[in-house]
Structure formats: structure tokens, C-alpha cells
Amino acid sequence: MQTRIPAVYMRGGTSKGVIFHENHLPGDPEIRDRVILAAYGSPDPNRRQIDGVGGATSVTSKVAIVGPATDSDYDIVYNFGQVSIDRPVVDYKGSCGNIAAAVGAFAVDEALVRVEEPVTRVRIYLKNTGKKIITEVPVKHGMYDEQGDYSIDGVPGTGGKITIRYLYPGGSVTGKLFPTGHATDLVDVPGMGEVSITIIDVGNPWVLVRAKDLGLKGTEIEEVENDDRIRSFLEAVRSRAAVMIGFAKTPQEASQKSQAVPKIGFFSEPQTYQALSSAVVYAKDIDLVGRVMSMGMLHKSMAVSCPMAVAAAAAIEGTTIYNILGSGGQRKAPFKLGHPGGIFDVQATVEQKGDQFELKEAAYGRTARRLMEGYVLVPERALGA
């Protein structure tokens, strides 16, 4: 027998996943995660999620759990989970700014907020990090107006622009903008030697590396997908950074138990390259080129927290990003980051207080669309029946 659980399947930005009302899931966290894993078809040793709704990539294996807020400063609570594809893990340590767009639209359509036209502000408490997000959702006839002329690279067509504002997102997971206390650190990677990195926590902890320090140009796409050596070097750097900030005791443990965070990306000066859509991204139109990994695989577009982290790092002397940009290249607004799918624009407001830095706000635009609604079916054994 199977159990029917109400659910909505949505795209948010360049990601998609299932959104559940909190009260439709078991209250026991262990049983709840078993239900989510069963719904997604995880764990699947073949990494296909063939027995569930998961899409077999990190960007299509995400879940959002939404509930009412108990604090008058918020409208809803959003708990984000990264559902592992091949392991029985739902990781709640980080956040997803793409899915946040879907959550804002979901809150409007599910009447979880007081709806106002033409724009409804949804005040979201991000349970994973304790931070506040405000989404500005276009509304027509009391529902999210998914039709619009706003486009984001990585998603075909256009949609209604949802503006997302992360308030004071620094230290979202670790409590510090720079978890190690340094703008740069050195990690010793077998077969490569010492590599200079910046570990910065904005939305998610990020490991930011210069492409040239890895022997890369920075515009690679297929090369990363097809070369185990490149991916293993990136994981070696990422897993060592995870140990440095206390997410694991050893690099091996980090690779096994902390796939989702910290995340890692490599960056270079602006270069002209061909995006996956075959469109040409010109060096003159961007401030930086970036490629990021998501749970061991190349992200085909861009994890939203990365541009926020990069834009913040660009304004702070001594970071790897600041050093790539050189004199006069910092504090641009909006900051334009070139990625495999095109260009991501982000606004970041950084203030310096003495020798400390504070990221007051990071803002960007996304679109969303409700794809399916109804019930997801899970075997009763997931509930312990």
C-alpha cells in the first residue's frame, strides 16, 4: 500500500522540487526524511532516482517545507532540504535562493499571506539559517502572475519577475562571514600542493578558488564533466575546507556526509565563451567568469548563493575574488557573473566597520512556475507501517 501526501511540484529559478505544507509531513524528523527520500526515489546507487520524482541532478533534487510563522515579523517559515541522490540523506544545513522564489509564489497561491496587487511582499523566515528573506511577488487576480517579460539565463522563455532580498545573509550557516576568520586560507592538496582559497558564508558556505590555481582557464564546461581528475581536485579542496570549518573530522567524512556544503566554485577574469544555449557570453558584459560544483557535479547554471558570496567577496580586500578583479574592479552594482547558462546579476551592499565587514543585503531576480499539484505517493514502509 502507498500513502498519499499533498504536494506541489514547482520550478524556482533554475531549480525545481516538491513543496510540502509542514503539517502534511510527519512531525518526527527521522520519519519525515524517510518519506521525503521515498518520494524522491533516494537513495539510488545508479544516481537516476528512477523510483521517485527526483530528477537525478542536484538542482532537481530539492525540497521545501513551508509552515506558518509564529513571529509577527514573518509570514511563513521555509525549511530547505537538499535531497541526496545516492545516499539516504536530506541535508538541511544550507539554503537555496532559487527555490526561495518558488516558496514566495507558493505562499501567495496557497493564501498563506495577505495578498496585494500588483506586488505582494512575502516575509520568509529561513529555518535553516535563521535569516530573513523578502520576496516581492507579482500578483494578478489574487495569484502569482507567472506571465511576464523577465528572463533568466538557464530557463527558456520569460516569466513574472520575483525579486528576492536576503537581509544580513552573512554567516548564514556558520555564524561568521568568514568562518575561519581570514579572507584567504591555504589548503594542501595531494598532487597539487598549496592552494589559496576564500571561505565565505553567504546563504551557504562557499569555497572560492582562482581557476588558474587549479590549472584551469575558468571557462570549462565539458572538461569538468568529462575529467575525473578535475572533479577529484575540486572535491579535495572542498572537503579540506569542510574540515577547516568543522563540518567533518576528515576530508573523507566530508565527502561522505557533507556533500551539499560547503560548496565550491572556481573563477577567472572576464573571458568570452559559448554558453550551453550556444549563445555567446562576451567578456565586456561580465565582471567575472565562474563555474560551481553541486554535490560533486558541475552546475549547469548557477547556485544563487554563489553570486551573493562572490559579490560580497569582491568588495573585501584580500579575498581570492578581490585579487582576480584587481584595482578598481570591486563594488560594482549590479555585479555580473558569467556562468555555463549565461549571466547572473546580483546587488550586494557591504559595509565596513573597523576591520570587520557586514553584508547588509543581497538582491536578485528570479522567475517561478507551478508545474504540478496533487499528491505524491510513498510506500507505507517509509512511515514505519
Image: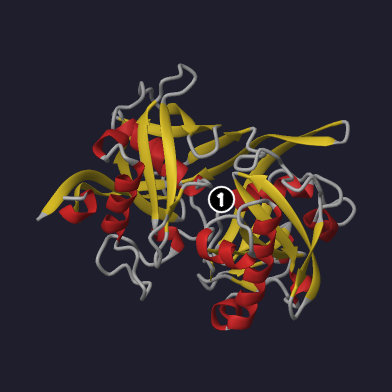
Q: In this rendering, is residue 321 above or below 225?
A: above
The image position of residue 338, as x and y in percent, is 64, 61
Quarter of the image holding residue 351?
top right
- Pick whichever, 193 or 143, lies toward us: 193
- In the rendered structure, the answer to whether residue 249 lies left or right of residue 114 reads right
Quarter of the image holding residue 89?
bottom left
Residue 276 appears anywhere in the view: yes
Residue sticking out furthest to the front: 249
The image position of residue 173, as x and y in percent, is 60, 42
Residue visible at 65% across and 51% down in the picture: 246
Task: State the SS at label 1.
Answer: loop
Q: Which residue is mark 1?
A: 304
Residue sticking out furthest to the left: 1
Residue sticking out furthest to the top: 72
**Structure colour scheme:** secondary structure
Residue visible at 76% across and 55% down in the picture: 198
- Pick whichever, 70 or 366, lies toward us: 70
Residue visible at 43% across and 55% down in the picture: 15
The amino acid type of the residue labelled 1 equals: Val
- In the rendered structure, the answer to whether residue 305 lies left or right of residue 215 reads left
